[in-house]
Amino acid sequence: MSQGSATHIRFDDDRTLLQASAQPAVAVWVGARSIARQVFRHDPPTPAELEQAIDQVEDALMATGLRQAARGHLVTGDAALMAPLGVRSSGEIATRDEVELAFQRLASVALGQPLPTGTAPLGREHAAILLILREFMHHLGYEGVRVEGSWQAVDPPHYN
């Protein structure tokens, strides 16, 4: 995945796919739906559930061999996934700082603080997506995430 390029991201049940242009997709074997089902037993998740999910994402990232580097933006074709970040239409971007702020709000609510006025609860799957985005940005060096058209990854080979 080259510096400054856009990397498409797709959230599947049990994995998250990353694909930079002209490169094979990389499967990160952790999925938003599996975190939502198996780890987040409460809505909002508890602090222990958030920590467990962070550990799973970090372990999955380490298994890919990808390292921290300047990578530009993550891109998704699914605006509905980004709506909780305020990203609703093509071209809109949520920066790394905005994703971090949204995650800190989730962590505060997990600790028992009320939601800020006018803020809707995320739900388990959106909370998992937020956590995955945050960890990818933090550990892999993405600057933000934007909505852009639609995208279909070429699945990477699956090694048993």
Image (tube, rainbow, N blue to C red):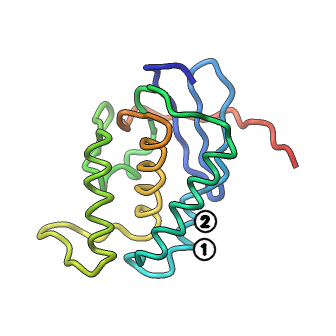
Residue at image mark 1:
38
- Residue at mark 1 to residue at mark 2: CA–CA distance: 6 Å
Residue at image mark 2:
34
Which residue appears at 60% of the width and 65% of the height?
34
Q: Is residue 97 above or below residue 14?
A: above
Q: Nearer the viewer, residue 45 or 122?
A: 45
Q: Which secondary structure lies at badge 2?
A: helix
Q: Nearer the viewer, residue 82 or 62?
A: 62
The x, y position of residue 17, in whole percent, is 61, 42
Would residue 19 be found to the left or right of residue 41 on screen? Answer: right
Q: Are marks 1 and 2 in contact (CB under 8 Å)?
A: yes
- Label count reads 2
**Snapshot quadrant of residue 130:** bottom left
Q: Is residue 131 above or below residue 36?
A: above
Q: Nearer the viewer, residue 107 or 11?
A: 107
**Snapshot quadrant of residue 26:** top right
